[in-house]
């Protein structure tokens, strides 16, 4: 079994992490587009090093976790999970419903109207579009599959909220999200993202989930391959080694106040996956091009979460 990390590969990993975070900081905080002497970083599309810096994650943080209006735990679970199934802030803004207002016919009508307007129902990375929502009823139209999945989620919201607010075992919590009913399931990647959202701070309260995200993480195929590139068979072992060896001389800056935040285990897993794409791109094996974020309608109030600095102070939001 391989358990001694390849130091040359590790150096390449950290160099990618440094450049990718610098590209985010320059673009979102400094509003500049300098050259990094790296055409791959400048032209290819990679996820952010910190998961909470993604636009798609900042949305549930702003919309649900740090919202002034009182929200029940089951409603929080329902809205975050439904949002993650769609994985698109612009779609949710048009068809999203709270649990107490959810009605399958209304939801389907809103989604159908949205489609007829010429808009895409799912984001390009949507879990639904890539069949992450799995039903045993073959031949269903996407709109019907979506409606059925959200309806089952509404029925399980209270049960899920009770379990997820007390369960400390990540794998048990993940399975609770995944297996909604005999005919609807949520794929592991989507379920893990929902679970991760529930570990972020809430305004004036602890995270909904008590799970320690630095003990276990769901590994995708990219991070598993990255682990082998690092000469380690077990991706969890590789991620924990990297997590413990975060080089202090890399300034992982988040904002202009100089906040430097340690990468969590899920951040490391995501970075491993993106680094593997980066390594593939060097030999022409990864071609996803950069798409300007300005092409999307909804934009976050700030490009970092409110618990970092610059607390949210507008309309329906409360500063901590």
Image (cartoon, rainbow, N blue to C red):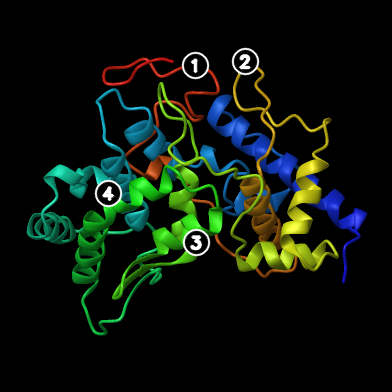
* Foreground label between 4 and 3: 4
- Measure the alpha-carbon separation of dots 2 and 3: 33 Å
Instruction: Report which quarter residue 186 is drawn in.
Output: bottom left
- Residue at the image position 59 percent from the left and 29 percent from the top: 32
- What residue is shown with label 2? 257
Q: Secondary structure at mark 1?
A: loop
Depth check: 301 or 319 in front? Answer: 319
- Disc 1 or 2, which lies upstream in sequence? 2
Q: CA distance from mark 3 to mark 1?
A: 31 Å
Q: Is the residue under label 2 in contact with that under label 1 (CB below 8 Å)?
A: yes
Q: Is residue 144 left or right of residue 6?
A: left
* Left or right of residue 119: residue 125: right
> What x and y, as percent, mark residue 26?
62, 31
Instruction: Count residues near mark 3 (Cα–Cα under 10 Å), then give few for <14, some for 14-19, many for 20+.
Output: some
Q: Residue at x 51, y 23 (%)?
A: 307
Res 158 label: 4
Residue located beneath label 1 in the image: 310
How far apart in space, not on screen, are marks 1 and 4 (Cα)?
Answer: 34 Å
Mark 1: few/some/many CA within 10 Å (<14, 14-19, 20+): some
Labels 3 and 1 touching (C-beta < 8 A)? no
Secondary element at tag 2: loop
Residue 110 in sight in this render: yes
Question: Nearer the N terminus, badge 3 or badge 1?
Answer: 3
Spatial distance from mark 1 to mark 2, Cα to Cα? Answer: 9 Å
Badge 3 element: helix
List the residue tagged with mark 3: 189
């Amino acid at each position: 079994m391989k358990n001694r990390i390849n130091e040359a590969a590790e150096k390449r990993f950290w160099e990618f992490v440094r450049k990718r975070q610098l590209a985010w900081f320059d673009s979102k905080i400094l509003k500049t587009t300098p050259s990094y002497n790296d055409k791959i970083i400048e032209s290819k599309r990679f996820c952010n090093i910190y998961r909470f810096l993604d636009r798609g994650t900042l949305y549930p943080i702003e919309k649900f976790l740090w919202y002034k209006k009182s929200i029940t735990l089951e409603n929080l679970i329902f809205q975050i999970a439904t949002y993650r199934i769609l994985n698109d802030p612009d779609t949710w803004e048009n068809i999203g419903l709270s649990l107490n207002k959810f009605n399958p016919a209304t939801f389907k009508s809103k989604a159908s109207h949205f489609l007829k307007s010429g808009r895409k129902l799912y984001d390009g990375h949507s879990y639904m579009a890539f069949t992450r929502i799995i039903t045993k009823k073959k031949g269903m139209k996407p709109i019907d599959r979506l409606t059925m999945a959200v309806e089952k989620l509404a029925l399980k919201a209270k049960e899920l909220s009770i379990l997820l607010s007390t369960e400390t075992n990540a794998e048990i919590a993940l399975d609770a999200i995944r297996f909604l009913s005999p005919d609807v399931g949520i794929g592991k990647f989507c379920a893990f993202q929902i679970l991760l959202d529930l570990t972020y701070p809430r305004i004036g309260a602890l995270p909904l989930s008590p799970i320690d995200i630095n003990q276990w993480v769901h590994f995708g195929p990219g991070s598993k391959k990255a682990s082998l590139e690092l000469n380690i068979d077990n991706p969890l072992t590789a991620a924990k080694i990297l997590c413990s060896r975060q080089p202090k001389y890399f300034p992982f800056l988040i904002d202009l106040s100089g906040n430097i935040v340690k990468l969590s285990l899920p951040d490391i897993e995501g970075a491993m996956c993106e680094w593997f794409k980066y390594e593939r791109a060097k030999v022409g094996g990864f071609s996803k091009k950069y798409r300007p974020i300005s092409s999307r309608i909804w934009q976050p109030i700030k490009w970092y979460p409110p618990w970092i600095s610059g607390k949210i102070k507008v309309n329906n939001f409360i500063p901590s």
